[in-house]
Image: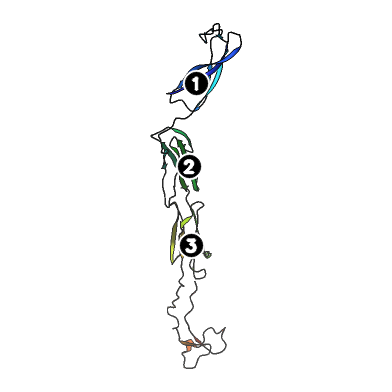
Amino acid sequence: MWLWIMKVCRLKTGQNGAPSPYGVAASISAASTTPPGDYTIALSESAGNTQTIDPAVSGGKLDDVTATTITVHVLAAPSSDTTPPVIVPSISGTLGNNGWYISDVTVTWSVTDPESAITSSTGCDPMTINYDTAGITLTCSAISAGGTSSESVSIKRDATAPTISASVTPAAAGTGWWNTSTSAPTVTYTCGDATSGVASCPAPYTFGEGASQSNSGTVVDNAGNTNSAGVSGINVDLTKPTVTWNGGPAAGGSYYFGFVPAAQPAPQAMLFPARITAQSVVTVQPLAATP
């Protein structure tokens, strides 16, 4: 309870009819919970009220008055609180890798001061971050009789999967196979991530021989999100075919075509007589394989 004692100066009419000032004591009280500020108080007195101001002087009276106002300044009471508010943030969300969140993130604040009331706060409302960001800082500030305090948190959010694509080079032959004319195919992966960046991307892979082969790879971003891609139906034959001549001339043997020596039997006297008109010796070599 606050108590003010003051003297309010008014005028009185003396015996000779001349006005003269006099003082009236007044007291004003206010509860300790009254907020600081300026308050206007009206003072009034019944008009025509006659009082004896001085026993030695008769006939004196108070002038007729109208309502009079005064302004009272209420100041904050001295506080025993010497510590500022305590601010504690609370973060709700799915935490991925490297401090990144991979879901929506909600930040709330606990603001307390056991010694005095919180008179004001800024930035302490709950907030949900539902978009990808490389970093956003939230700050809560509060004031009490013990002073001012603030706390900040930084949030990184990446809830979007990275991108990945697979391509095969060189192109297959017209038969749909990779062969000696095309060389072995290699699958290459291209990866990307717009927010946290790529942590790992699959290395190129070269196929060996085989039919209906496949290969796949997985990309991982720095937040821990993943995505996959691959290729299938890869047919590779890099081995040339072999040719075996069964029952024919032996490799490295020499044979006469056309007019053969007289010692040769008559049935072998001429082979292909329409094309060969002179004696020739032909040595048989293995044929080169073609794909």
Looking at the picture, tell me which residue is in the foreground, 8 or 202: 8
Query: From the viewer's perspective, is the residue at label 1 or at label 3 nearer?
Result: 1
**Mark 1–mark 2 distance (CA, rounded to whole Å):** 47 Å
- Earlier in the chain: of badge 1 and badge 3, it is 1
Q: Secondary structure at mark 3?
A: strand
Task: Answer above or below: position of 253 versus 49.
Answer: below
Type of amino acid at the residue the image marks with label 3: Val
Looking at the picture, tell me which residue is in the foreground, 286 or 70: 70
Q: Secondary structure at mark 2?
A: strand
Within-10-Å neighbours for mark 1: few <14, some 14–19, many 20+: few
- Residue 8 position within the rendered picture, expressed as x and y whole percent measured from the top left: 53, 18
Q: Residue furthest top?
A: 59
From the image, tell me which residue sits under label 3: 187
Q: Quadrant of residue 89?
A: top left
Q: Secondary structure at mark 1?
A: strand
Mark number, residue 6: 1
Labels 1 and 2 touching (C-beta < 8 A): no
Query: From the viewer's perspective, is the residue at label 1 or at label 2 nearer?
Result: 1
